[in-house]
Image (cartoon, grey):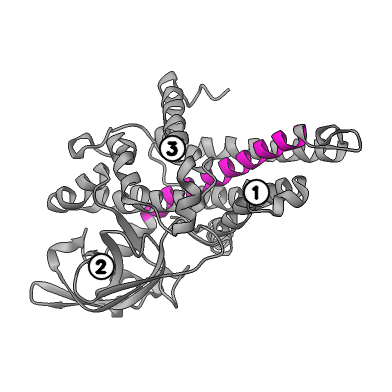
Amino acid sequence: MYSKYFTEEHEMFRQSFRAFLEKEVRPNVDQWEADGRLPRSIYKKFGEMGYLGLNRPEEYGGLGLDRWYTLIFDEELARMNSGGFGASIGAHSLLALTHLTYNGTEEQKQKYLVPGIEGTLIGGLALTEPAAGSDVQGIQTTAVKDGDHYIINGSKHFITNGVYSDYLIVAVKTDPKLGAKGTSLIIIDRDTKGVSASPLKKLGWHASDTGAIAFDDVRVPISNLLGEENRGFFYIMQHFVSERLSMAVGGVAGANYAMELALQYISERKAFGRSLNKFQVLRHRIAQMASEIEMNRVFVYSLYDRFEQGEYLVKEASMAKLLATQLSDKVITQSLQMFGGYGFMEDYPLARMYRDTRLGQIGGGTSEILCEIISKALIDKKGY
C-alpha cells in the first residue's frame, strides 16, 4: 500500500530492525524502567549495527541512507512500549548527532560524531530551563568570553540523557542584549569542572534519565562553540522540523501498537458467552481508531516525502505533531478501556503506554505552542 515510499530494501530493514529490538530490547525494558536509565551497552549494540548513523555521512561512519529508514526506525522504537527508551536513543541519535552533523567543525565531528555513531559516546541536547521551556528565546544560561574560553553559568531542566550522557549541546546566551539573536550552542563535556546534574522523577518515560543540570563557572574552550556565535536560535528552529516529524511518527506508531494490543485482547477475552470483539460498541470504536490512525499516517508520510525533497515544513510539521500526539492519547486511553480492570494493572502493557503518551503533547513544543505557530502562518501570514 505504501510502495510509493517504501522499497523492498526498506521493508527488509524493518524486519531486521524489529528482530534486533525483540532480541536486545524488549526482554530488558522492564529492568531499564526500574533502573531509570539505559545501559551504555545498548548504545554500543545500536552502533555496531549501524542504527545510530542511518542517515549520517559515510565519511563519519554513517550509512548515508534516506529519511525513510529513520521513519521506520522511529516506528519500530514505538513498538517497544517504553517512551523513555525511545527518548534516550532519540535524544542521542536524532538531536545531538543532528546538530553535530549539520553545524559541527571537522574536529568536533571526529571527537563527538564518529564515536556517537559508534555508540561509544552518548550525547544530549540541553535547551529547556526552569523558567524557559516553550519560550526558547527566554533562556538565561550565559556564556561569557574569557580569553580563549567561555565561562558558563546557569541551569537546564527536563533534559533527556541529562545525567548519564558524556556530553551535552547546550543553548546559552552569548549576547543577552540581542535576545534570541544572541543565542549560541556550545558542547560541554560531562566531566568538565562545575557541571552537576541530578535525576528527576517523572510520571512516565521511566527508562530515560531526565536531569536537572547546573553550570557553575564552567570553563569551556571557544573551540567547543557549535556553528557560528549568536546563530544558535536559528539552528534550534531549523532542526525542530525533524524533531516534530519524528514525534508525529512516534505518535501514530504508538497509537497503532496500542490498537494492535487491544485487537488481540478483545479477540481472546470473553464476556456474556462471546468474545469482546463481537460487541458492536467495541467494533465501532476500533473502526474509528483505525480510520484516524490511517489518516494521520498518510499525512505524516506525505510530509516525510516533501521533507526528503528539501521542503522546510514548519507549519506542516507542527500540524503533524499536534494531531499525532493527540491521537496517541486518545487511542491509548480507549485501548486501555477495552482491557477493563486489566488495563489499569502494571502487568499489562497499556498502563505504561498511558503514562508515557502524555509527554507527547509537551515535549518538542507543546500543543499550545504548535497551535500558535500554525495560527501565525494561517492568520498572520508569517513565513518560516
> Which numbered mark, 2 or 3, is in the foreground of this view?
3
Could you say which quadrant of the image residue 23 lies in?
A: top left
> Which residue sits at x=81%, y=39%?
282
The percent coordinates of residue 171 (x first, y second) are: 31, 67
Residue marked by disc 2:
230
Residue furthest left in the image: 147
**Rounded to the nearest whole Å, what is the CA distance between mark 2 and mark 1?**
44 Å
**What is the three-letter code of the residue carrying label 3?**
Phe
Q: Do the residues under discs 2 and 3 have CB atoms within 8 angstroms?
A: no
In the rendered structure, which disc, 1 or 3, sits on the residue that comes first in sequence? 3
Report the predominant secondary structure element of the magenta stretch.
helix
Q: What's drawn in magenta, residue-wise?
A: 238-267
> Which numbered mark, 2 or 1, is in the foreground of this view?
1
Q: Which mark is residue 73?
A: 3
Residue furthest top in the image: 8
123 on left or right of 159? left
244 on left or right of 65? right
What secondary structure is marked by label 2?
Answer: loop
**What is the three-letter code of the residue carrying label 1?**
Leu
Q: Which mark is residue 350?
A: 1
In the rendered structure, which disc, 2 or 3, sits on the residue that comes first in sequence? 3
192 on left or right of 278? left
Residue toward you, 222 or 309: 222
The percent coordinates of residue 303 (x first, y second) are: 50, 39
